[in-house]
Amino acid sequence: MSSAPIVVHRPSRSGGRRVTVHRHGRDEILGTAYSDHDLVVFLEGAGITESDAVLDDPRWVEWRDGPAHQFSAA
C-alpha cells in the first residue's frame, strides 16, 4: 500500500494508465491518462496545484507496475 495520494496504475493492454487519487477516505478514479499532459489535466481538475511538479515526487505520485511516464500498451 502506497502512502502517495495519487496512483498511476499499470499500462493497460490497449494503452493508457488509470489514475486514482485518495481523498476523503476513499480512492477516486480520475480517468485514463495516455500522456503526462493528460495526467497533469486530471490532477489540476482534482485541485492539485503545480501538478506537473509532483509527477516525479514519490510523496505525491506512485507509478505502479511500469516505468514512470510510459503510457504505451503493456
Image: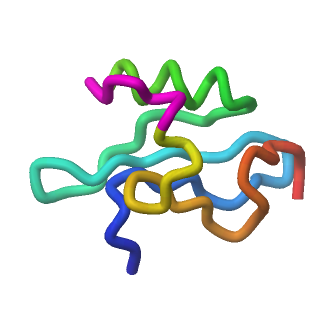
Q: Which residues are magenta?
A: 47-53
Residue 50 x, y percent position in the rendering? 40, 24
**In terms of image quadrants, where is residue 25?**
bottom left
Residue 27 x, y percent position in the rendering? 29, 54
Name the image quarter holding the C terminus: bottom right
Name the image quarter holding the N terminus: bottom left
**Residue furthest to the bottom:** 1
x 52%, y 61%: residue:
62
Residue 31, placed above or below residue 40: below
Give the side of residue 33 with respect to residue 67, left or right.
left
**In terms of image quadrants, where is residue 47?**
top left
x 39%, y 21%: residue:
44
Taking the magenta stretch, the answer to whether it contains residue 50 is: yes
Give the side of residue 30 with respect to residue 12, left or right.
left
x 57%, y 31%: residue:
39
Residue 28 x, y percent position in the rendering? 31, 46
Taking the magenta stretch, the answer to whether it contains residue 64 is: no
